[in-house]
Amino acid sequence: MQNQISNWAVEDKKHIGSIENGINIDHIPCGNAFYIMKILNLYKSEYQTGIGLNLSSKKIGKKDLIKIENRELSAQEIQAISLFAVGSTLSILKDFKVIKKVILAMPDVVHGIIICPNKRCVSHHHVSQFLAVANRNNLIELKCNYCEKSFLLSDIKEYNL
Ligand SMILES: [Zn+2]
């Protein structure tokens, strides 16, 4: 296991260099870096940011990667990005060293981000609220609090970001 982690670290340096202080979100499912950039408002921020898209990964085949120098994340931000980064690794770096590493998990409740795929759902006129209801066969299912229909995370395509 230790070996694997150091291999990933080598992989990252190869991709977009290392950062001194800040955060590294690695093994983001391909295509989801875009949503995380929006949630963290990276388009308008002054933080030095490295973004890798479609990088090769020994662990998940292809991945996205975001590194932000001197940035910290609030608990609320971590919860919001987790929807798009289930299984990703969030590392906090200080003086080029990883001081904390967490695997991001699906939040129990997702508030206001998901647009319900059910076109007739009343939540289109309110702030949506989804509950993570099941995790069968490694598939994440979310249930709309308004129409009570469940959807696979992979079938949810529209977000309010
Ligand atoms: Zn709904």
Image (cartoon, helix red, strand yellow):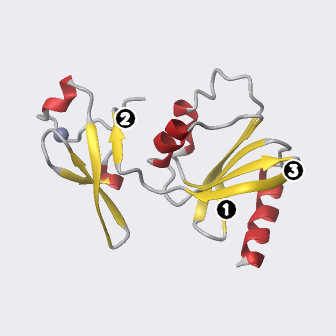
Q: Residues within 10 Å of mark 2 (few under 14, many from 20)?
A: some
Residue 35 at least partly seen: no
- The answer to whether residue 32 shows anywhere in this view is yes
Q: CA distance from mark 3 to mark 1?
A: 23 Å
What kind of element bears circle 1?
Answer: strand
Q: CA distance from mark 3 to mark 2?
A: 33 Å
Quarter of the image with the C terminus in it: top left
Q: Residues within 10 Å of mark 1 (few under 14, many from 20)?
A: some
Q: Quadrant of residue 74?
A: top right
Q: Residue at x 82, y 57 (%)?
A: 14
Q: Earlier in the sequence, mark 3 or mark 2?
A: 3
- Point out residue 115 in the picture as x, y percentages from the top left corner: 29, 35
Q: Earlier in the sequence, mark 3 or mark 1?
A: 1
Give the residue pinned by disc 2: 113
* Whole-percent x, y for residue 124 in the image: 20, 28
Could you say which is closer to the camera, residue 61 or residue 10?
A: 10
Residue at 53 percent across and 37 percent down: it is 77
Depth check, mark 3 against mark 1: the one in front is 3
The N terminus sits in image quarter: bottom right
Location of residue 11 by image quarter: bottom right
User: SS class of the residue under badge 3?
Assistant: loop
Numbered mark located on residue 22 in the image: none
Pointer 3 with pointer 2, Cβ within 8 A: no
Residue that mark 3 sits on: 96
- Residue in the picture at 77% in, 57% down: 12
User: What residue is drawn where x is 33% and y is 32%?
Assistant: 112
Mark 3 vs mark 2: give the one in front.
3
Which label sits on residue 56?
Answer: 1
Mark 3 belongs to which amino acid? Phe
| Towards the viewer: 64 or 40 | 40
Q: Amino acid at mark 2?
A: Ile
